[in-house]
Amino acid sequence: MGRLDVARLRRKKRKALRHPIAHGILLVLAATALAPICILLLNSLRSNEAISGGPIGFPSSPVWSNYTSAWDTAGYSVAFRNSLIVSASTVLGVCTFAGLAAYGLARIRVRGSGLVLVYLLIGLTLPAQLFLTPLFIAWVHLHLNNNLFGLIFIYWGIYMPFGTLLLRSFFISLSPEFEEAARVDGCNELQVFRRVVVPMAWPALVSLAVIIAVWSWNEFFFAVTFLTNPNVQTVAVRYYRFLGIYSSNLADISVGGLVVCCVPVTFFILLQRRFVQGLAAGGLKG
């Protein structure tokens, strides 16, 4: 017993030593990730002359007019609305269609389901930029360029494989007993999915919604290619245009960068508990 007690004490000391090291590493990583946002926040409250004199520093007197100036000059009111429409529609469409497809792949045993999974994996691994030229030609003929729905439709196709595979792995981990009980009570498959599966899979759906919302809000490549009309451009595209036209005004550029990143950060902070809960519940398990 004495040797066991000594071994336990040694293990406790080792764990105690590991925690400060782990916390120190996490603090360094957090500081590295937050440093650009903090610099943007500080520079957004400084004058353009002060930023030119030193890119890193605290504002001696906050210049709040930078926010109204950058917002009006860049036309963020329209761009902000467009990004909200695109992100919300993308999240709603991916969660709905990917959820239905994932439930079918997880519960219905039919021939060829393995080929469907292979097809989804191929769609997940291939870079979406490979389809840019044929997509652009097709969208021009269908009059879907400079159209928010056209961009939303592309995002559905890009993010659907990931969402389907993510939700399928979660549905497989769910016990089918509640579904069988609902079928005995007279529910059809759609009612089983809506009334039984969706409430149980809510953490996984929230996790998927957070990921898709951040991706669609920050997506730039397809947005800048298919949205050339300023009235339909998203925040990321408007910031790019604003950066090219007003590159000398560093204060307004800082405000613009802060506007682009504030919504995803706020969205993640509000839903971080659900997001972590969905991952811990098996949303990323195979």
Image: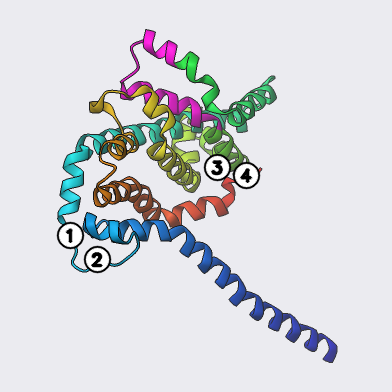
The residues tagged by marks 1 and 2 sit, at their Cα atoms, a distance apart of 8 Å
Where is residue 144 drawn, in percent x and y? 35, 16
The residues tagged by marks 4 and 3 sit, at their Cα atoms, a distance apart of 13 Å
First in residue order: circle 4 vs circle 2: 2
Tag on residue 148?
none
Is mark 1 in CB contact (under 8 Å) with mark 2?
Answer: yes
Residue located 74% across and 80% down the image: 11
Is mark 3 in CB contact (under 8 Å) with mark 1?
Answer: no
Residue 103 lies in the magenta-colored region: no
Where does the magenta region start and end?
136-161
Disc 1 target residue: 63
Disc 4 target residue: 173
Q: Which is nearer the eye, 134 or 155? A: 134
Tag on residue 59?
2
Is mark 1 in CB contact (under 8 Å) with mark 4?
Answer: no
The residues tagged by marks 1 and 4 sit, at their Cα atoms, a distance apart of 53 Å
Identified by mark 2, the residue type is Pro
Residue density around tag 1, few if under 14, some if 14–19, many if 20 or more, within 10 Å: some
User: Foreground mark, 4 or 3?
Assistant: 4
Identified by mark 1, the residue type is Val
Identified by mark 3, the residue type is Phe
